[in-house]
Image (cartoon, coloured by chain):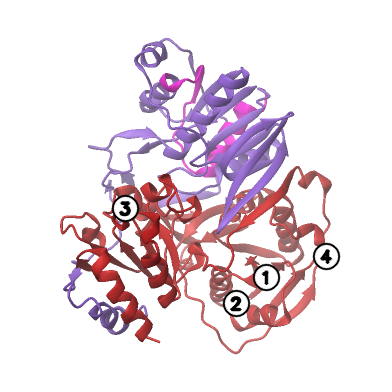
Chain colours: A purple, B red
Amino acid sequence: MKILVCISNVPDTTSKISFTDNNTKLNTSGIQFIIGPYDEYALSRAIELKEAAGGTVTVLNVGEADTEPTIRKALAIGADDAIRINAFPKDAFYVASQIAAVAKSENYDLILMGRESIDYNSGLVHGIVGELLGIPSVSPVMKLDIEGGKAVMSREIEGGKEIVEASLPLVAGCQEPIAEWKIPNMRGIMSARTKPLKVVEPADITDNIKLLNYELPAPKGACKMIDASTPEKLFDLLKNEAKVL
Amino acid sequence: MSVLVFVEGAGGEIKKSSLEAVGYASALAKKINTQAVALVIGKYSDDQINSLGKYGASKVLSCKNDKLSQPLPMPYASVIAEAAKKENADTIILSRSSVVDAIASRLALKLGAGIVTNVVDLPDLSSGFKVKKSIYTGKAFAFYDLTSPKKVITISKNAFSAVEGNGSATVEAFDPQLSDSDYKVQIKETQKATGDVLLTEADIVVSGGRGLKGPENWNLVIDLAKALGAATGCSKPVSDLDWRPHHEHVGQTGVKVSPNLYIALGISGAIQHLAGVNSSKVIVVVNKDPEAPFFKAADYGIVGDVFEVVPKLIEAAKALK
């Protein structure tokens, strides 16, 4: 089983988001970057599949040199090798096109990634990669097993789930609880330093959307407190003040 | 030229979020002086189909092909692309859902269209085609210009209000070409909770956390939700402990919701939970710990024991009717 796991390099969930350069750039000062949490679940499942049936796990990130600590963490978790496509991840179409350009010649059985990145929340990369490679894609996948050369998956739908089956090769956008979250051990951290990390230059992609600028939401007003002895007053406020009832 | 809007249903009923998308498509069509065409795939009653006209569609393409009874992204993307070509649609609108991401990404590629998801407002057409998108799980917005002739937009739930009017639409049967190569993924089984209000579609969500102390106390959450006609949700620890099913887990790694009213009972408000609810219009928090971080994100708060406060809230909610 030859598995590719695509990871994003994103601000930690607890990060306070602000912008610089006239609201055109993320202010990265004080922000810790991590593997996208959904991507980390995909990576964990890839490693479980490799441990059970053999094969290789390659991680791929579209990012500039500053994403390498995040890639090394993925290697410490258990990926065998890594590819960094040396480009700023402009948008979902651009990232997916770069992934597809690399994956085209490598014949991966499975291409796993998170259902979406937690920065731009677009949820598009898996579908675009599948379409570009002419292979099926499924998302959001909560369970993935390989049985008789096919992938059997459980996919979340509103208010329930679907059991779906697809032939390989396949792209899956993953989310918990697809695998046990893995914490790198000392051996993994040591070996990650020497595992191969290949840097490739990006393919030439013509973009059809242009990021203009960012904006922060209006600051939230103070929380209005209601006495616990008269909680029913809440509904008057929801009805007459907030007008949501 | 037209604006095409994909209409999704659940359990034989058109989703509220799809009606919002029809309203959005109609408002956009008016701005560019064209018509909104709704594409509905599946078997719906005449009333349901006619309602699309009331929300602003001028025309409805009704596709009842049995091979499309299950919402598979690959054939759906092909069918929507065919409808877009047939109607000469420059812009295609979809409401974001668990299946729409996969449909929209493939659709955009088939049409060579630029795509932006999670759009929260009508496009600004004063120079180009400028859209506002929610990013960082609701913590910020980004503005994009879609420069391609064809455009695909998915809109966030509750970002645009569906307003029912007196309009009507002509209904036309649509029988697209289907390709076997689009059926590489097969749905073997669907396991759906029945009788509940869909969490992602609900106007009101009542969620419970570890403060409820155990699944045996969940009647407090359920009864308040029932009295308000709300859906029920829970925090991550609650679904991890198997007190509630995973599809009720609200948060960054679970379901993201954006109701008009989100009521959190006994949830302290970890950042991962807030990430799943922070686009709610109004947030109410009931927690006995006055230092619970959730109060900072809430509009209304009650510091008190859920076992004392919630029964009173249930009685008061019943009296609202």
Q: Amino acid at mark 4?
A: Asp
Q: Is residue A121 left or right of residue A204?
A: left
Instruction: Give coordinates of residue B75: x percent, y percent.
Output: 74, 52
Chain to which mark 3 belongs: B
Q: How far is mark 1 from mark 3, CA to CA?
A: 35 Å
Helix, strand or loop for disc 1: loop
Q: Nearer the viewer, residue A133 or B158?
A: B158
Q: Which mark is residue A65?
A: none
Q: Residue furthest front?
A: B216
Q: How far is mark 2 from mark 3, CA to CA?
A: 53 Å
Q: Which mark is residue B175?
A: 4
Answer few, some or many: residues within 10 Å of disc 4's Cα (few below 14, many 20 plus, some between 14 and 19).
Answer: some
Q: Which residue is mark 3?
A: B210
Instruction: Give coordinates of residue A13: x percent, y percent.
Output: 33, 43
Q: Is residue A12 left or right of residue B28?
A: left
Instruction: Give coordinates of residue B143: x percent, y percent.
Output: 41, 56
